């Protein structure tokens, strides 16, 4: 795989966003959000998704110059209308509102409607860390997931991210899909021509399959846990909570009405809301206890878990966020690897918009 620097990919992505009509400011925000995924090793949500945003713009589903606004608020809450903008831009706007409200009220909660795919959940939650706040981010997504015992696709991969500051230790950053695997990981397997692990997918009859194209062929992703005996009902509960917080609460489309990002699905003809939904939260630590005391205790918590006795001496115990943080340091130094299929995709975008990409 060829390696590309962060700056190369950021400049290219920013240029593409400008070509579809984004302002210079929004193009930079979108590229910042997008490239955060590649840096953190979440390759399924980085530049590999760039052509997907262009495709939605070509279909008239993305407004490159949205008038993002608050449509309802209280001192600690707000509903934001993203005006069909890039979720990569709408979500940072909403998170900033949550932080501003937390500064005043102690906590801030923002529900978002009329948005689109917003990249990796962790990026948005982490915006709270510099303010000595705990950040929370979640979103509903393309309906590709069947609830436990169902063969219908009713939910998205619906991720949850929580970012918690520490003192000397790096922050705790939990960022996970509420499915056994995110759809982006399937796309990577498809590009590599590999099968999916058992438990990720079911076919259109609801039976387990390892065919990485199983969802495209009418099947579904399974909730976290895979099946009932392994706790899929818990994954179903988590995914449905995200759907309700992100979309039912905001007035966005929920469940099977959520507008899809994937190219093999079209939006439903009878929407129940506006666009896709997100939910952002910020909690000021000192609204609960002195921030330094809390962060010292977080250091102790992290150190104790890191030093827990491992099953295999060669495999250390990790804290949520460790692998991504370590990957970011490596990729900022050595470059970001791109699969040939992704390079070809970006090259085609470069030709479309007359932007050099090698």
Image (cartoon, helix red, strand yellow):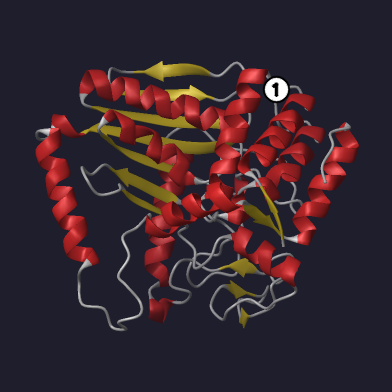
Q: Where is residue 136 in the image (x, y as percent from the top left)?
A: 35, 41
Choose top left, top right, bottom left or bottom right for residue 122: top left
The quarter of the picture where residue 283 lies is: top left
Q: Mark 1 points at which residue?
A: 22
Quadrant of the image containing the N terminus: bottom right
Q: For this rendering, which residue is in front, 176 or 241?
A: 176
**Residue 232 point in image, percent of width and height:** 42, 71
Q: Residues within 10 Å of mark 1 (few under 14, many from 20)?
A: many
Q: In this view, does 320 lie to the left or right of 296?
A: right
Could you say where residue 274 lies in the image, as x and y percent from the top left? Answer: 59, 31
Rendered location of residue 52, percent (x, y): 73, 44
Residue 235 visible somewhere in the drawing: yes
Q: Which residue is drawn at 25% across and 49% down?
A: 169
Question: Is the residue 255 above or below the residue 110 in the image?
Answer: below
Q: Measuring 75% from the left and 47% from the top, which residue is drawn there?
A: 266
Above or below, 191 against 166 in this view is: below
Residue 330 in the figure: left or right of residue 209? left
Residue appearing at x 15%, y 29% in the figure? 287
**Of all residues shown, which one is farthest toward the front?**
333
- Left or right of residue 197: residue 180: left
In this view, the residue in front, 325 or 126, is 325
- Element class at badge 1: loop
Q: Most extreme residue toward the bottom, as rendered?
A: 312
Q: Is residue 172 above or below residue 234?
A: above
């Amino acid at each position: 795989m060829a390696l590309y620097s962060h700056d190369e990919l950021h400049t290219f992505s920013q240029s593409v966003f400008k070509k579809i009509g984004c302002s210079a400011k929004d193009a930079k925000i979108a590229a910042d959000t997008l490239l955060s995924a590649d840096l953190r090793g979440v390759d399924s949500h980085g530049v590999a998704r760039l052509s997907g945003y262009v495709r939605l713009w070509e279909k008239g589903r993305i407004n490159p110059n949205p008038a993002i606004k608050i449509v309802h608020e209280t001192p600690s809450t707000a509903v934001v209308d993203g005006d069909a903008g890039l979720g990569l831009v709408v979500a940072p706007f909403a998170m900033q509102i949550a932080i501003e409200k937390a500064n005043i009220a102690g906590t801030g909660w923002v529900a978002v409607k009329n948005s689109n795919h917003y990249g990796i959940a962790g990026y948005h939650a982490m915006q709270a860390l510099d303010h000595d706040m705990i950040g929370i981010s979640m979103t509903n997504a393309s309906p590709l997931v069947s609830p436990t015992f169902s063969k219908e696709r009713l939910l998205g991969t619906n991720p949850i991210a929580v970012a918690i500051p520490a003192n000397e230790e790096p922050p705790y950053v939990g960022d996970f899909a509420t499915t056994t695997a995110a759809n982006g990981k399937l796309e990577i397997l498809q590009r590599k021509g590999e099968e999916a692990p058992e438990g990720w997918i079911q076919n259109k009859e609801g039976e387990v399959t390892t065919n990485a194209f199983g969802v495209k062929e009418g099947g579904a992703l399974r909730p976290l846990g895979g099946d009932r005996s392994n706790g899929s009902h818990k994954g179903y509960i988590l995914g449905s909570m995200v759907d309700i917080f992100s979309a039912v609460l905001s007035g966005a489309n929920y469940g099977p009405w959520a507008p899809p990002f994937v190219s093999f699905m079209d939006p439903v003809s009878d929407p129940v809301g506006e666009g896709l939904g997100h939910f952002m939260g910020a909690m000021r630590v000192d609204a609960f206890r002195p921030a330094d005391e809390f962060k010292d205790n977080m250091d102790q918590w992290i150190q104790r878990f890191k030093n827990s006795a491992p099953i295999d001496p060669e495999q250390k115990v990790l804290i949520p966020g460790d692998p991504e943080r370590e990957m970011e340091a490596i990729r900022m130094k050595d470059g970001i690897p791109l699969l040939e299929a992704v390079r070809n995709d970006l090259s085609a975008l470069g030709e479309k918009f007359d932007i050099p990409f090698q």
